[in-house]
Image (tube, coloured by chain):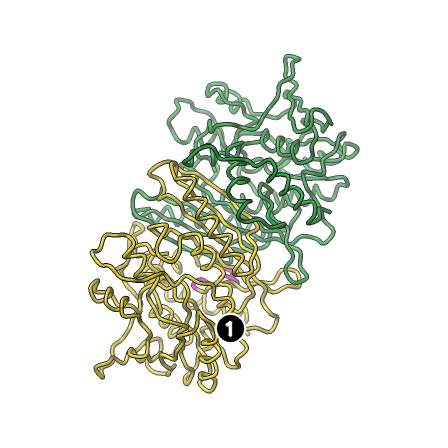
Chain colours: A green, B yellow
Amino acid sequence: MRTEDDVLERIERARRRKPRVREQRVTSAHGAGGKATQTLVEAVFVESFRNPLLEPLGDSAELLLGDTRLAMTTDSFVVSPLFFPGGNIGDLAVNGTVNDLAVAGATPAYLSCGFILEEGFPIDDLRRIVRSMGEAAEAAGVSLVAGDTKVVGKGSGDGCYINTTGVGLLPPDRSLGIHTARPGDAVIVSGPVGDHGVTVMLARGELDIEADLVSDTACLAEPCARLLTVPGVRAMRDATRGGVATVLNEIARAAEVSVVVDEGAVPVRDEVRGACELLGIDPLYVACEGRFVAVVDGAHAEQAVSVLREHPVGAKATVIGRVGSDPAGTVLLNTAFGGTRIADLLVGDPLPRIC
Amino acid sequence: MRTEDDVLERIERARRRKPRVREQRVTSAHGAGGKATQTLVEAVFVESFRNPLLEPLGDSAELLLGDTRLAMTTDSFVVSPLFFPGGNIGDLAVNGTVNDLAVAGATPAYLSCGFILEEGFPIDDLRRIVRSMGEAAEAAGVSLVAGDTKVVGKGSGDGCYINTTGVGLLPPDRSLGIHTARPGDAVIVSGPVGDHGVTVMLARGELDIEADLVSDTACLAEPCARLLTVPGVRAMRDATRGGVATVLNEIARAAEVSVVVDEGAVPVRDEVRGACELLGIDPLYVACEGRFVAVVDGAHAEQAVSVLREHPVGAKATVIGRVGSDPAGTVLLNTAFGGTRIADLLVGDPLPRIC
């Protein structure tokens, strides 16, 4: 189990690295989930909020309240457009936070929601969004227990922003964490990647591309819980901002290992691949909202995949790579052409607001 | 203790009243904390999130997780300007959520924070805000354990919005609630009202008024905890959006009682009174960020006031009125001129964004 000392040591290490924000102003890259986000968090937030419980780039914090172990996580949703094929900001906001609890190994229990509405926002749109939230919460087995609504002037928002914060119950003996990945582990994705991000980009209507795609937004509580019945599960992480490649980089860095991915094994729908080629982006960096990466002891990888496939959300789960030892902190892609390339953290922000 | 049945019955009653949002679009009044906010919450949110734990207009939800009783609350902060005399959006966001837990009788423990930053926001301003949050959290004895940062395009925000969500520990036997107010109870405010709201209005620089005022933003955890050592404390509620008058109306409605306030007994600083007269607003409706209203058994009112006065934040605590029986659901003000007037919920939104 991760001790406070481990975490304090990591914070200390981050401080010694002394990340610096070189920019004087916030840029879209600071919100993209890649290198700039990581630097901002480490240089600005960790410094001031310094405490052993803060998991700066983790999915959930692990806490003790009374005698109860719980996970807590927060996420703000600023997706544009608010409605897209397969979902809207409402179910996205519920699933996103439920999933952050689920991948931490917690049983999602309660959610709060905070709305920031722009003056003039249609009440009927709000109704649709709120209804989707209620349905998504019911499907996930969580209760929306606290809310807040603020209204900002026209031009000070973009219709509707939603923050959801969730708490869930953590079994006393459960201890997952990407820092526990070790050479020989299998790396699994729970399904095709990039559907959500590409769907949202196309829904913005700025690109002259049509594709028969819907967002993958889904609740991962059930598949995560099932996967945890398999021995040797080290960590799960949902592949949202920054996509699967960002999660793999986080694993490589946290565990000081390499992650070697067989690019051809990564499930990508033809429509996603086609759109990404036209856009000049790599589907591995595109956000999903109903997919996660799991690191599992290699000996149990087959069982893990077959358990995941029993659930509709995990029907296309597959092993995409392995954890290695060298070069530590690096994600290597074995390409279809027999070459190898490094898949680093995103530096800029190639994508519009998709979550 | 409030039972699920009580809450379900209230929801049922709200449904029977069938509040309707007549507007087709969100207006600033929907965010002002008065009648329009209440209607929006009841007509749009309660309907979809229907569950016995949702306390639509309360400060915190009371929950059970494992064997632990906890309170959870959420609040988004959109104050403009971000920096004002006596504080900034950062300490406001920490104190606001800590206070919602404290007035529910919980011991604040953990906070999450979600930032929505506008592209171009100065990193140095962010640093100042984050530093204030860290200091406010330390002063309140809470840990900031989870965070999220999103960046929106220029013109889709207003510099920096912050959501904070908090959880706190609730003693098993603690049961506070404004619905428990009964005739004969004393109504206490913990200090002078309206400082925060007037300070922020003046800081916007749109009014040609100068006054030597600072925000009352403060942590209420300690004064609330001390007050709870006095027997007969029925409820506490912090007077934020909509001010003291809104809290009094909530009490009158929830408990189906009248609240009779001696207007001359309400502590208001001369500067606040003067600015409010010039602005044509009533200080009783102006937001505070470090003041609360307490309903206490009349027999213990004196003790309650003297306990509050031992703490700097409560140094000017005073009894401002009594709970009566008729007319139920109404707040009556006995004015300095010997008259009586009704202080109803705010209908419009006379004030700029102050929290």
Residue range highlighted in magenta: B51-57
Q: Closer to the camera, B267 or A260?
A: B267
Residue at the outermost bottom position: B299
Name which residue lies at 76% across and 35% down: A297
Q: Position of residue B10 (x, y in %)?
A: 45, 69
In the picture, which quadrant includes the N terminus of chain B?
A: bottom right
Q: Closer to the camera, B176 or B318?
A: B318
Name which residue lies at 48% across and 22% down: A275
Residue at the outermost top position: A337
* B318 left or right of B351 in image: right
Name which residue lies at 44% across and 29% down: A201
In the picture, which quadrant includes the C terminus of chain B?
A: bottom left
Residue A346 belongs to the span the image colors magenta: no
Q: Considering the whole magenta stretch, tell me its main secondary structure.
A: loop
Q: Is residue A315 visible?
A: no
Q: Which residue is mark 1?
A: B176
Q: Position of residue A69 (x, y in %)?
A: 66, 56
Q: Position of residue A123 (x, y in %)?
A: 34, 50
Q: Closer to the camera, A175 or A48?
A: A48
What kind of residue is marked 1? Leu
Q: Tell me if residue B151 comes above or below residue B43 in the rendering.
A: above
Q: Classify residue B314 by image quadrant.
A: bottom left
